[in-house]
Amino acid sequence: MRQALFFAALVCAPLGLCAADRTLTYEGHPSAIYFSPDSKTVVAGSWSGGIRAWDVDSGNLVKDKTGLKGTFLLSPSLYAVIDEDNRTVAIWNLVGQSRVRLFKGVDPSTLAVSHDAKLLAISSGEAQTVEIWNLATGKQNQLVQDGAGGAARLVFSPNDQALVSANYDNDIRMWNTETGQLFARVGDPTGTMFGAEFTPDGKQLIVAGLDETVYIRDAKTLAVIRQLKGQGEAIARLAISPDGRTLVTSGRDPIDARNPAKVVIWDLPSGEIERVLQAAHPAFALAFSPDGKWLALTLKDNQITLLDFGAPGAK
Amino acid sequence: MNDPAKLNRRQVLELCISRGLLALAAGSVLLPKQLFAAWQQAEQQALKPTPHEAFGPLFLKDAPNQRVLRAPGDPGVPLKVSGRVLNTKGQVVEAAVVDFWQADHRGLYDTHGYRYRTRFTPGEGGEYGIDTVIPGHYPDRPAQHLHYMVAAPGHRTLVTESYFATDPFFEGNIDKNWNKQGIAEHKEMILPVSLFENASADNHSMHAEITLDIVLEKA
């Protein structure tokens, strides 16, 4: 019963969740979760588990694409199918079930699509580059030189004018998506930054990763403004609420899987920890609904939890 | 270099023998001219660039320059990793910088410090040598492996990994299992392991050795 929606009385108590939280069943571990712009649909995808979408209010499954291999969910409406053997990346539209583009000769370490869905960034670890493509025309806008490791995380700024790569070589680089000009590069991170997100106002870039610390950086210079410590384990992903007041980080000891994984919810203005949730695995997928009511994440095997953050706009 | 037009067949064969290309010449029906072209081509690309393997998420930059990673009393099978850093013509690459990192004998990486991590410039003749231990297995990446990142001016930065032919992961059959679970991307990166006995009167310990010549391409 994949579409079953459980009001999570059974899981609430041990996980410390409140009664309004919900769970959706998903076989496997989603690597990406997105909400639709109207916050009414939530979509999850993983490499081998396919893509599923649910109506948030009813919990009904509205899309179930299984049997795919190499899927990488890029947005609520676009996903990539990566064929490593043939070095191709096909971009598909989830809603219309149509193939948008096919890219050949690519072996991505990660991908990202711009907020306006016009640009696709492909990081290649082997080529040590990031390609920025125009999805509408199929033309390559820019080819920029990245570090030796490939990007652990690619993220577009809210206005899509900048693209950030947090590379496995630990460095962070930021380019102008139109001209390919390098806006900034910092070599001060001490470990790969697996999580990188802009604040909704676009003024700050928050990164976190292997060195267990959250770094709040100026979005123009990438200089560190503030650090938050307290996760005590490597951070896999992060998410920022639409009002910019809440930060969520998920992590685990990257070395010893016997240690529990945690999700930490921070009050961003004060930098204080509000809640800590135990998780079976680090949540590699985290997403706030655009109305701010829900945080979707994985806390247990084979399910997605929707944490209730209260009435839309309120917190 | 001699003008190919002035070389007779015997001279070309002699050259090939001296360059280790006899295997190519023997049994082939190549004309002397073709043979010479093959030799010339081989001269220009004498060595195949070391292939790229995955970078992995656990690199830490700015590791200390240290050649002895195995501290006294560290458990695990002692391992010597050695080789040279060369270009595709077999020449020493100047000013190369090698980052090397690996798990300890349990398969665990140090992410809070620099145990089993080093960054160094090879010595004279491009030679390097590292004293370490054979890394252990860990669940996410079940084949034992060592990480290398090698950068040098004018050359493409190489990111690679080497694996151990002795690793039970390969079930004693490299030809069949080299790409098992898609972990090793190139069979040639599964390196033979030599075992040596450190024999003394009351101590018969063992150590292992692997050799990896790292060949960089021009940028």
Image (spheres, grey):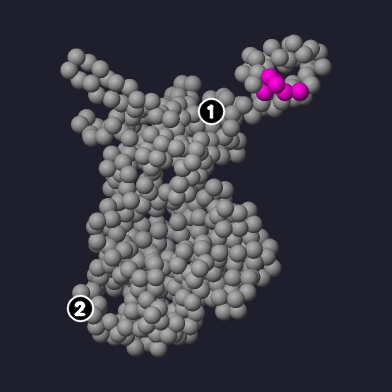
Label 1 residue SS: strand
- Quarter-of-image position of residue A8: bottom left
Does the magenta-highlighted stretch encompass residue A107? Answer: no
Quadrant for the N terminus of chain A, please.
Answer: bottom left
The residue positioned farthest toward the right in the image shown: B5
- Quarter-of-image position of residue A80: bottom right
Quadrant for the C terminus of chain A, please.
Answer: bottom left
Question: In the image, is residue A177 above or below residue B10?
Answer: below
Would you name the residue on which mark 1 appears?
B86
- Position in image of residue A256 (x %, y %): 27, 52
Q: CA distance from mark 1 to mark 2?
A: 61 Å
Q: At label 2, which amino acid type do we have?
A: Ala
Q: Which residues are magenta?
A: B24-29
- Give residue A13's mark: 2
Q: Nearer the viewer, residue A178 or A280?
A: A280
Q: Nearer the viewer, residue A129 or A246?
A: A129
Q: Does residue B2 appear left or right of residue B162 in this picture?
A: right
At x 57%, y 48%, the residue is A127
Q: Count of labels shown?
A: 2
Q: Chain of mark 1?
A: B
- Position in image of residue A190 (x %, y %): 36, 50
- Position in image of residue B168 (x %, y %): 36, 39
Q: At label 1, which amino acid type do we have?
A: Leu
Q: Chain of mark 2?
A: A
Q: Residues within 10 Å of mark 1 (few under 14, many from 20)?
A: many
Q: Residues within 10 Å of mark 2 (few under 14, many from 20)?
A: few
At x 40%, y 56%, the residue is A193
In the rendered image, residues at marks 1 and 2 fall on the same chain = no
- Position in image of residue A102 (x %, y %): 64, 63
At x 70%, y 27%, the residue is B41
- Give residue A195's mark: none
